[in-house]
Amino acid sequence: MTNKNVIKRILICDDVADNSLLIKTILEAEDCLIEIVDSGAEVLTFLETNLNPPDLLILDIQMPVMDGFEVVQRLRELTKFQFIPILLVTSLDYDLNQMNEIKCDGFIQKPIDIDPVISKVREILYRNS
């Protein structure tokens, strides 16, 4: 990534292990520290139980029980997690107005393509550098 001196921590949540592993592989090559959970409830538990929140949450939209939209809504309601940037992963199309309404920082389209993932993650992690 842009600043090699700072290792960025990223939490990935997808109920399909192959999707998480693909994103993890892409971002580990960019010197990111990756943690993976497989449900919306696990995202909330992870954040509540870890002292150091991640620098970015990459979150699948379509998951059973608690979808990505519900996770975003819950996180944005909690002051201590409002600052965490969130990239949603989806096979659906969304425009900028929807992204602002959902209060996320962007979308990654499925099927996963390496260059857009790296570009979007860099943009979010280093936008204030």
Image (cartoon, rainbow, N blue to C red):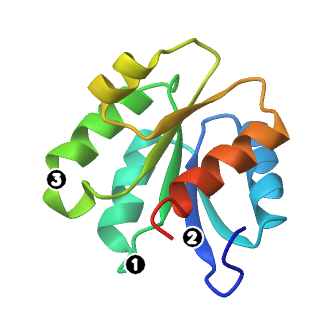
| Residue lying at 29% horizontally and 58% vertically, measured from the top left | 83
* Residue at numbered disc 1: 52
Q: Check disc 3 and report the residue beneath it.
A: 78
Whether residue 79 sits left or right of residue 46 in the image: it is left
Q: Report whether 38 appears left or right of 32.
A: left
Asked if residue 117 is positioned above or below residue 79 in the image, the reply reads: above
Q: CA distance from mark 1 to mark 2?
A: 9 Å
Residue type at mark 2 is Arg
Three-letter amino acid code of the residue under disc 1: Asn
Residue at the location (81% across, 53% down)?
26
**Dot 3: within a 10 Å radius of its alpha carbon, few (fewer than 14), some, or many (20 or more) residues?**
few
Q: Secondary structure at mark 1?
A: loop
Q: Residue 111 has which mark?
A: none
Q: Which residue is mark 2?
A: 9
Q: CA distance from mark 1 to mark 3?
A: 16 Å
Mark 1 neighbour class, 10 Å CA radius: few under 14, some 14 to 19, many 20 or more: few
- Whether residue 79 sits left or right of residue 103 in the image: it is left
Closer to the chain start, of discs 1 and 3, is 1
Q: Is residue 25 above or below residue 115?
A: below
Q: Is residue 30 visible?
A: yes
Viewport quadrant of the N terminus: bottom right
The answer to whether 94 is drawn above or below residue 51 in the figure is above
Residue 123: give x, y in percent of width and height: 58, 52
Other residues around mark 2 within 10 Å, as few (<14) / some (14–19) / many (≥20):
some
Q: Residue 74: image x %, image y %?
A: 23, 41
Q: Residue at x 61, y 35 (%)?
A: 15
In contact (CB < 8 Å): disc 1 and disc 2: yes
Circle 3 sits in a helix, a strand or a loop, which is it? loop
Q: Position of residue 38 (x, y in %)?
A: 57, 45
**In the structure shown, which secondary structural element does the residue marked by tag 2 occupy?**
strand
- Image location of residue 41, percent across then percent down: 38, 45
Q: Residue furthest bottom?
A: 5
